[in-house]
Image (tube, rainbow, N blue to C red):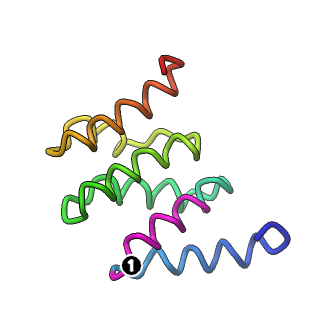
Amino acid sequence: HAGEAPAARDIFAAVLGHPATPELALAAAEDLADDRDPRGAQALDRLITNGSLAAALRGQAAAAHTAARIVTPGLVAALADPDAGVRVEAAAALARFAGKE
């Protein structure tokens, strides 16, 4: 989407609002966050803290923070997630930011 970034961002943002496709929402959030669009960070924050989503998806949202080079309140809150895998992904992401891989 490099040549048509504004149009692509609008399409990705539209996907974020569709609750039936959390996997697509995660992919859209990652792309938006990579482009430094604040809607991407907001969406990653919502995805990682949404307890109704599968733990695997919340863990992927935690990992996506690293690629997007952002820390959200949800990433920090994920350290207390009921699922151990999510907690590990959140801790790993935060450790990468601290340079403690």
At 45% across and 64% down in the image, what residue appears? 26
Whole-percent x, y for residue 24 in the image: 47, 73
Outermost residue on the top side: it is: 100
Which residue appears at 50% of the width and 53% of the height? 41
Q: Residue 38 appears at what percent x and percent y?
A: 57, 56
Helix, strand or loop under label 1:
loop
| 64 lies left or right of 67 | left
Q: Nearer the viewer, residue 79 or 42?
A: 79
Q: Where 88 falls versus 40 (above or below)?
A: above
Q: Tell me the quarter of the image containing the N terminus.
A: bottom right
Q: Main secondary structure of the magenta part?
A: helix
Q: Which picture quadrant has residue 92?
A: top left
Q: Amino acid at mark 1?
A: Thr
Residue 16: % across, % down: 46, 74
Reply yes or no: does residue 26 show up in magenta.
yes
| Residue 65 falls left or right of residue 84 | right
Instruction: Decide: is 13 above or below 88.
Output: below
The magenta region covers 20-31
Question: For mark 1, what is the residue?
Answer: 21
Q: Residue 50 occupies which quadrant of the picture?
A: bottom left
Query: Is 13 rendered above or below residue 36?
Result: below
Horizontal arrangement in the rendering, residue 1 relative to residue 93 (left or right): right
